[in-house]
Amino acid sequence: MRSSYYLDRLVRERLKEWPQRPPGVTRAPLGRDAWLRGRPGHEFHTHPFLKLPGSTRYRTLPDGLWFNFGGTPDDPYVDIFAIEACASFQNLLDKRSRFAPSTHSLLAVCPVSWLLAPVAKDDPTPRWKVTRVIRSDPTSDFVVPVRDMHVLYGLKREHYAEFARHQLPHPHEFFAPMDALTATDGAKNPELHTLLARASATANFMSVPPSPTRIEQDRVDR
């Protein structure tokens, strides 16, 4: 129990060093990019969390949680990237169930105090301004539906090898050895960048869609 607690704490401390946009995740199409790190943070008791509609007690508190806000002020949504450190197989099964595909939409709850706080120690911009979907200073918590999600699970080496040998991840799931999350400067790991690039909104599109002008020019050339 003590080692699991220490591991969770170490992962969260390392994730505090990660940037506002998850490393390796490419920018959204048409430049739409409004990423904010929700967990972990330097504030206390004001972190965002996930919940099911109508639930007052059920909360999902990932070790790491990033939001990419989108839509309009009248029809907002958020895409999420979460990180869960799993010290055991039982822990993995429990955490996977929280992100399993469902007919219910997850809701992201952003406390008003978190939205009013600065983006970072070196950036005084209030978080709500970065979202681009909140019109003015919020006076209450902002609850927004989750449109899309990707989850990275960190596993101990022996569990990682066992899972990779016998299991098949869901499309929204990604797996890495726990070392990648606890390493100093882990956010700069090129292998992690390559993995998380596949968790980007642009991953299923061509990098540069051909323009109509280019298509017509190709016809002329032929």
Image (cartoon, helix red, strand yellow):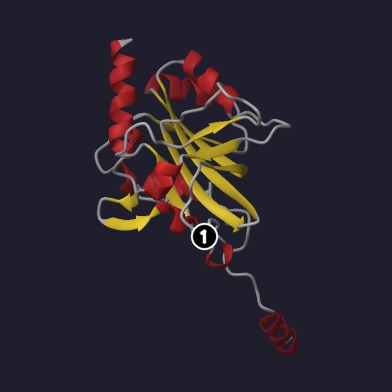
Total numbered badges shown on the rendered structure: 1
Which type of secondary structure does the marked residue at label 1 adopt? loop
The quadrant of the picture occupied by the N terminus is top left
Q: Is residue 55 left or right of residue 7?
A: right
The residue positioned 57% from the left and 21% from the top of the image is 166
The answer to whether one can see residue 174 in this image is yes
The answer to whether one can see residue 182 in this image is no
Question: Where is residue 186 shown, x and y percent of the image?
Answer: 31, 41
Say few, some or many: other residues with alpha carbon within 10 Å of mark 1 (under 14 / 14 to 19 / 20 or more).
Answer: some
The residue positioned 38% from the left and 55% from the top of the image is 126
Residue 123's image quarter?
Answer: bottom left
The residue positioned 25% from the left and 55% from the top of the image is 122
Residue 16's image quarter?
Answer: top left
Question: Where is residue 124 shown, x and y percent of the image?
Answer: 30, 57
The residue positioned 58% from the left and 55% from the top of the image is 70
The quadrant of the picture occupied by the C terminus is bottom right
Residue for badge 1: 132
Residue located farthest toward the bottom when viewing the structure as drawn:
220
Q: Is residue 107 left or right of residue 117?
A: right
Residue 147's image quarter?
Answer: top right
169 above or below 79?
above
Residue in front for this viewpoint, 27 or 130: 130
145 above or below 24?
above
Residue in front for this viewpoint, 177 or 27: 27
Residue in front for this viewpoint, 211 or 70: 70
Residue located farthest toward the top when viewing the structure as drawn:
1
Question: Where is residue 14 shown, x and y percent of the image?
Answer: 29, 36
Residue type at the position of mark 1: Arg
Q: Is residue 73 left or right of residue 196?
A: right
15 above or below 32?
above
